[in-house]
Structure formats: C-alpha cells, structure tokens
Amino acid sequence: MKKKQLIGIVVAGAVFIAVCATGILSNVVQSKLTAATEDKKNTTDVLSSIWGKSEEEITLPTNDFVGVLNIVGTIQASSSRSVSLTGSDDGQYNHDLYMNYVDQLEKSKNNKAILLYVNSPGGTVYESDELYLKLMEYKEKTKRPVYAYFGSQACSGAYYISMAADKIYTNRNTWTGSIGVIVSLTNYKKLYDKLGIKEIDITSGKNKSMGSGGLDLTGEQRDILQSLVDEAYDQFAGIVSEGRGLDINTVKKIADGRIYSAKQAKEKGLVDEIGSEDELKALIRKENKLGKDVVYDVAKSSGSDFLSGLMGSVQKIMPKSDSELAVDIVENKGKGVLMYYAD
C-alpha cells in the first residue's frame, strides 16, 4: 500500500471518530435540553449535568457504614475534572475527591470507620503527606479507627499513607515497603550536543536553573537536591516509627528503599496480619460492633462528567504513538519532583 493511501486512511479514520463523537455529544445535549424544557429546569443546571459539576458532590449512606478509599495507581495531584480520567470513577487515585470525602466522613454520625484499599506504587511527597495528615485529623476528631488492606503492591507513598491505619492486613502475595525518597531528572545535554542545540538560561542565581535538561548538575546542586531528599526521608522514617511503634533506628535499618514480601513485612513489623480482605472486614465488624449487612461506601463523585467519559473513550481506541509515550516518560519520570515512589 502506498504511503499516501495509508495517510488517507488514517486521516479518514480520525475524521470518522470526530464526527461520531460530535454526533453523540449533540444527541446528549439535545436530549438533556428537551428534558429540561419539559421539567422546567434551569438550562445552567442541565449543562452542568452534561459537562460535570464545578465541585465534587458526595452523598453518604443514611445508615451505619464504613468509608472506603481506593488508594490505587500513582498518588498525585488530581481531580475528576480532568479529561484524562484520573478520577476514582475509573478506579484511579483522586486526591481532591479523597480529601473532600474524609472531611464529609468527619461530619457523618453514621460513619463508623475508614478502610483503605491500597494497590499503588506510591507517588508525590506532598499529596502522600497531605492525605496522611487528613486521615490522622479524622482519627483525632472522631475517635474512629482506620484500617488498611494491601493488594498486589503498597509501596512508598502508599505505605506512607497507610501509617494512619490502626490495623494493616496484607495479601500473602503483596509487595510493600520501598520506604525512601527519589528525585528523577532527565538530562538531554549529550543529545543537544549531537543536534547542535545549546540551552541558555538567564537566571537570578547560579542554582536557579538547577535540574534543567540541557545542563549538567554541579556538585553543589547535587548536594542541594540530596538535602531535600534526606529531609523527606527523615519525615518518612519518623511517620513509620510512630505508625508502627518501632524505634527510629530500627526503621532506618530496614528503610533502605527495598521492597518486602508480605511475610518479610510482617517479620519486620511493617504490617499486622497476612490474610484476606474478608478477614479484615470481619475484624472491622467485630471491633466496631457492626452487623454483617454494614455498608462499605466507596469514595466517589455523585456528579457525572460527560466530557471526561467521552475523551476517555476516544483515548482508549486511539493508542499513543511511540513519540507520545516517550514524552510521557520524560514528563512523568524526570520532572525533578520529590517522590515516595517505587519505580
């Protein structure tokens, strides 16, 4: 097949997808507006229901329940407003929603506990610590317990958040730990040299351009970044020491960044029990005097986001090119952000 014919087919396919998406959007908008006219609703409310709410709306059960946070995927700043579908509706981590959800649990008289379901390699230092502190605030204000169940992985920032839990159960095949901090930078200098490109930065100080992709790090700059890593590491070790009731020196001996199996983690005192999620739920019912029909309410937004759903569907049928994947790697793995992350 000739190159021009192939390009024509690709372009035609893209146009077809765009037309279909536009048609679907048009039909949904028309049906919503028609319904609004019949019900005498405000047009603004209708458009809000199509494109999504400006804020997360959370509806909690009216009887006794346990709030569930799915700590799944990379822990990072996120919102269900994103068209990249980083919200909890697709099972991924949603920081804004979870912070709001815990606030609502604090106010609810029907909430009896929180269950963290953890299956994550970790994420950013800031968001990991912020959710941890929010959970500790919940415990302090309500005097209610927090539990954690580890799925296939509960590493680094995910383990950090779990230090708010009073009891940790883990699957027998779980990998956990990875207690440590990493800053990843991507250096393009040799590539730039081959291409005849030179980065020029006009800065207010010699370290202002520290970490720029086209420049090598100086010894001083490495020391600066190492000091940030060390400070975040000390914070992490302190959280583990407090959360697990371990001496800080003991923690630092085992907190060298390595991953532990479930059995190893229990031997080190990093988890309480190896068992099933059902066994943990039985413990929750027993300790909180709850019936077998107690509701486990998963944190989610009650508002729909049509645009996110539409764009997410298009992304699924249009896989990323090699160049797009390369850009993702550079942006996500080499952006110089402090991470509690198991790579």
Image (spheres, rainbow, N blue to C red):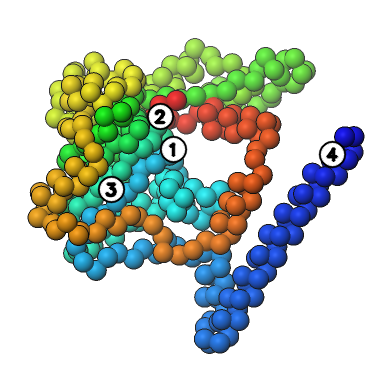
Name the residue: 76% across, 49% down: 14
- The amino acid sitting under disc 2 is Tyr
* Front of the two marks 4 and 2: 4
Identify the residue position indicated by label 2 in the image.
341
Would you call the spot at circle 4 few (<14 residues within 10 Å), some (14-19), or many (20 or more)?
Answer: few
Q: Can you say whether 120 is above or below 51 in the image?
A: above
Would you call the spot at circle 1 few (<14 residues within 10 Å), some (14-19), or many (20 or more)?
Answer: some
> Residue 32's spot in the image, x, y percent?
58, 76
- The amino acid sitting under disc 1 is Thr
- Picture quadrant of residue 22: bottom right
Identify the residue position indicated by label 4 in the image.
6
* Front of the two marks 1 and 4: 4
* Secondary structure of the residue carrying numbered label 4: helix
Identify the residue position indicated by label 3 in the image.
134
Alpha carbons under labels 1 and 4: distance apart: 37 Å
- The amino acid sitting under disc 4 is Leu
> Residue 140's spot in the image, x, y percent?
17, 49
Q: Can you say whether 205 is above or below 131 in the image?
A: above
Alpha carbons under labels 2 and 3: distance apart: 20 Å
Quick one: label 3 or label 4, which is nearer the N terminus? 4
* Left or right relative to 228: residue 218: right
Identify the residue position indicated by label 1 in the image.
74
* Secondary structure of the residue carrying numbered label 1: loop
- The amino acid sitting under disc 3 is Lys
* Secondary structure of the residue carrying numbered label 3: helix
Quick one: label 2 or label 3, which is nearer the N terminus? 3
Quick one: label 1 or label 2, which is nearer the N terminus? 1
